[in-house]
Image (cartoon, rainbow, N blue to C red):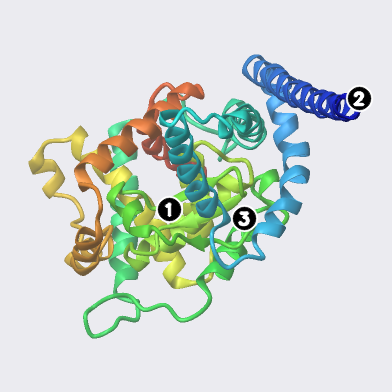
Amino acid sequence: MQRAKNHQNLQRPQRLQKTDKAMKKNRLKWAVVSILLLLSLLFNAAAWVSRPFSDYYTDNIFPKLTEGYSRFTSLFPFSVGEIMLVVLVILVIALLITLILRRFFLWKILPVIVAVVVTIMSLNCFVLYHCTPMRVAENTKESYDLQDLMALRDYLVTKCNELSLTMSRDNEGNVVYQGNMKETAKEAMLGISDRQKRLDGFYATPKALTFSGFMSQQYMQGYYFPFSMEANYNDDMYIMNKPFTMCHELAHTHGYIYEDEANFLGFLACIESEDPVFEYSGYLGVLNYVNNDFYKAVDKETYDSHVKITDLVKYDNQFLTDEAWKKVEDNAIFDTETVKKAADTFVDTNLKVNGVSSGKVSYTHVVSLLLDFYNENPFD
């Protein structure tokens, strides 16, 4: 009896030690979670109430925080952000399974994941929405009239019509690109770094997404991943979308989170590039926004009286070729219309939550930036 009692006395302190260690780990976990969430709350509050705070952070601190990480993720030939999303989906499924089975061991890490996600999104995304809007010209008009929009639209159509005739094409009429498009995109962005302070410095290598088919169902051309600081693009879309999209997404990685600003910077980088395919892609990238605004502003007879968009430009202005769409639909797991509606709702909600009241319509605000730009830089 005595020996058994001594054995129990020896075991009890070990169990207590294990319990103490577990309690200490749990307290440490909640301390870290609380600190991260509190700091994120204070950080976001400062960003919402103070544009100078957001501007200073984005101009001076954001590049230092993200450059090293961006260099690291650029070492991988695949999209690190896409892998993270896949892991997230698997984790959510696992959490649901453990909830059904009433085995909650995985739920213990959920607060930490939430805190880390909120922190990263705050530093690499949320704050960027509260910066001072970008100016593309020193002198701008208070408002533009129909004649201004008409002149811009006709200029863009004329440029597209002319450039379409200079492209190298294969036997099926598709544009062919010779060279390294990803490197050219980075060079194009550096080429306009004298225009905006944040555009200088290191650029991540644009990466094609493995699940480009699912991306096509969302009618999305590219994504910026705040968690990996990558510029990702849809590899299934027609080639003429790619240069503009790469530059657009690279603008996001340098702190230009507004879609109209990224659209304008993508356009400017492309048209000022010495690469003719990039130049053409730049004009095509904004053509629909301007042409649609003009179409809505006039009657059909007036619209038809203006410079016509050639069939060749219409072909180059497609999102996916018929062949690519067939492949997407054949491999689709979910209905495309359902995926598109869900994606539209997510994007629109995300923009509005971050203070962009117009939601997805903000993409079309690039027309105003173009009018400002060409008001100070007359058409050639």
Residue located beneath label 3 in the image = 192
Residue located beneath label 2 in the image = 2
- Say what amino acid the circle numbered 2 marks: Gln
Q: Is residue 144 visible?
A: no
Q: Residue at x 64, y 48 (%)?
A: 195
Which callout, 2 or 3, points to the residue nearer the camera?
2
Q: Left of 10 or right of it: where is 26? A: left
Name the N-terminal-most of marks 2 and 3.
2
SS for callout 1: loop
The residue at the far front in this view is: 1
> Do the numbered discs 1 and 3 sit on residues whose CB atoms are within 8 Å?
no
SS for callout 2: helix
Q: Label 2: few (<14), some or many (≥20) within 10 Å? A: few
In which quadrant of the rendered image does the N terminus lie? top right
Q: Which mark is residue 379?
A: 1
- Say what amino acid the circle numbered 3 marks: Ile
- Find residue 77 and report its image quarter: bottom right
Q: Nearer the viewer, residue 45 or 247?
A: 45
Q: Nearer the viewer, residue 34 or 162?
A: 34
- Say what amino acid the circle numbered 1 marks: Phe
Q: Residue at x 29, y 60 (%)?
A: 158
Q: Residue 137: where, in percent of width, then height? A: 56, 39
> Do the numbered discs 1 and 2 sit on residues whose CB atoms are within 8 Å?
no
Q: Is residue 229 above or below residue 149?
A: below
Q: Label 3: few (<14), some or many (≥20) within 10 Å? A: some
Name the N-terminal-most of marks 1 and 2.
2
Q: Left of 324 or right of it: where is 138? A: right
- Find residue 257 and report its image quarter: top right
